[in-house]
Amino acid sequence: QVQLVESGGGLVQAGGSLRLSCPASGRTGRTFSSYIMGWFRQAPGKQREFVGAISWSNTRTAYADSVKGRFAIYKDNAKNTVYLQMNSLKPEDTAVYYCAADLHSSNPHPYQDQYDYWGQGTQVTVSS
């Protein structure tokens, strides 16, 4: 089992910034260094969508076009934590943000059904 607990969400004005955190814990027989960690979001009335992902082993990243240049994913190996830094936030970024762990893939990707574990989500609200 892997436990993921997102934090850092809140209310921010358009143009502002937030940083979400996702510490990973638990035992799966694999080290965290082999995981792909993804961030997804779900706005009210919409399907959950890919935001970005990072390979824990080689730090490769992938981002949705809608967030490229504004969001960045990075990790802290010592803390087993992945972060989503969100800058220049827009009202359309309002959503519940989830982190997820893929224990089997080699490169970051947007395919939700390949992620094995999910956090409970954290709300991000951007006011105009």
Image (tube, grey):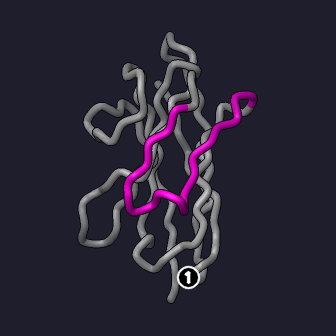
Magenta residues, as a range?
60-78
Residue located farthest toward the front when viewing the structure as drawn: 69
Asked if residue 69 lies in the magenta stretch, the reply is yes
Q: Is residue 116 above or below residue 99?
A: above
Left-right relation of 78 to 68 = right
Left-right relation of 105 to 18 = left
Q: In the image, what residue occupies the spot 41% across and 21% down?
A: 106
User: What x and y, as percent, mark residue 33?
Assistant: 58, 20
In this orientation, which residue lies closer to the viewer: 59 or 81? 59
Label 1 CA crowd tier, 10 Å (few <14, some 14–19, many 20+)? some
Residue located farthest toward the top when viewing the structure as drawn: 29
Picture quadrant of residue 79: top right
Element type at mark 1: loop
Q: In the image, what residue occupies the spot 66% across and 31% down?
A: 80
Q: In the image, what residue occupies the spot 34% across and 61% down?
A: 42
Q: Is residue 33 above or below residue 109?
A: above
Residue located farthest toward the bottom when viewing the structure as drawn: 128
Q: Amino acid at mark 1?
A: Ala
Q: Is residue 103 visible?
A: yes
Left-right relation of 96 to 11 = left
User: What x and y, as percent, mark residue 24?
Assistant: 58, 34
Q: In the image, what residue occupies the spot 41% across and 67% down?
A: 95
Q: Is residue 119 visible?
A: no
User: What x and y, as percent, mark residue 1?
Assistant: 46, 24
Picture quadrant of residue 96: bottom left
Asked if residue 35 lies in the magenta stretch, the reply is no
Picture quadrant of residue 108: top left
* Number of numbered tags placed on the structure image: 1
Q: Is residue 84 above or below residue 104?
A: below
According to the picture, the residue beneath numbered tag 1 turns out to be 14
